[in-house]
Image: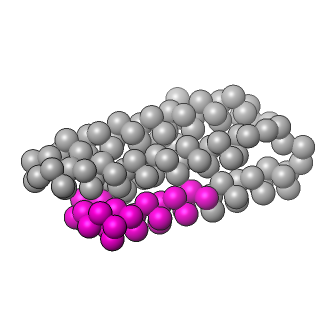
């Protein structure tokens, strides 16, 4: 085994916290364009962090008795994550009618954390 479950949990927590920091930063950057844009950008990034938290909670929920069980938890977590992200984006864009460019920018910025976290995972 290359990594322990504890290191995986720590990495998932670090990614989620970095995504929340990116949400705050995106909100501050878009505050120059207006309050609605700032809320939209921050909300776009927060739904990615919520999806990451849900995936992590599902995947690291228990001890893996087999590879099939671990794969099942991973796939279930990914499915739930995408439900949260698509549903959250739907709520942001259609229910609250917030600016779409800011929401998608926040979402992409939060996903960029994955690229950095796995590239520089010291």
Along the horizontal axis of the image, is 90 left or right of 24?
right
Q: Is residue 16 visible?
A: yes
Along the horizontal axis of the image, is 35 left or right of 100?
left
Determine the residue located farthest toward the right in the rendered image: 65
Residue at 19% over, 41% down: 28
Residue at 33% over, 44% down: 23
Look at the magenta stretch and give its main secondary structure.
helix
89 within the magenta span:
yes
* Segment tinted magenta in the rendering: 80-105
Residue at 61% over, 58% down: 80
109 within the magenta span:
no
Q: Nearer the viewer, residue 54 or 116?
A: 54
Is residue 109 placed above or below 18 in the rendered structure? below
Q: Residue 83: x percent and y percent?
A: 55, 63
Is residue 65 placed above or below 111 in the rendered structure? above
Which quarter of the figure is the N terminus placed in? top right
Q: Residue 60: x percent and y percent?
A: 71, 40
């Amino acid at each position: 085994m290359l990594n322990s479950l504890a290191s995986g949990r720590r990495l998932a927590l670090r990614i989620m916290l970095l995504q929340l920091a990116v949400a705050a930063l995106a909100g501050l950057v878009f505050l120059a364009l207006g309050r609605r844009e700032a809320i939209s950008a921050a909300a776009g990034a927060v739904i990615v962090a919520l999806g990451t938290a849900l995936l992590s909670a599902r995947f690291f929920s228990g001890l893996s008795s087999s590879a099939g069980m671990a794969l099942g938890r991973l796939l279930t977590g990914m499915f739930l994550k995408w439900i949260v992200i698509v549903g959250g984006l739907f709520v942001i864009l259609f229910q609250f009618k917030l600016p779409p460019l800011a929401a998608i920018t926040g979402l992409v910025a939060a996903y960029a954390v994955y690229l950095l976290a796995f590239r520089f995972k010291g």
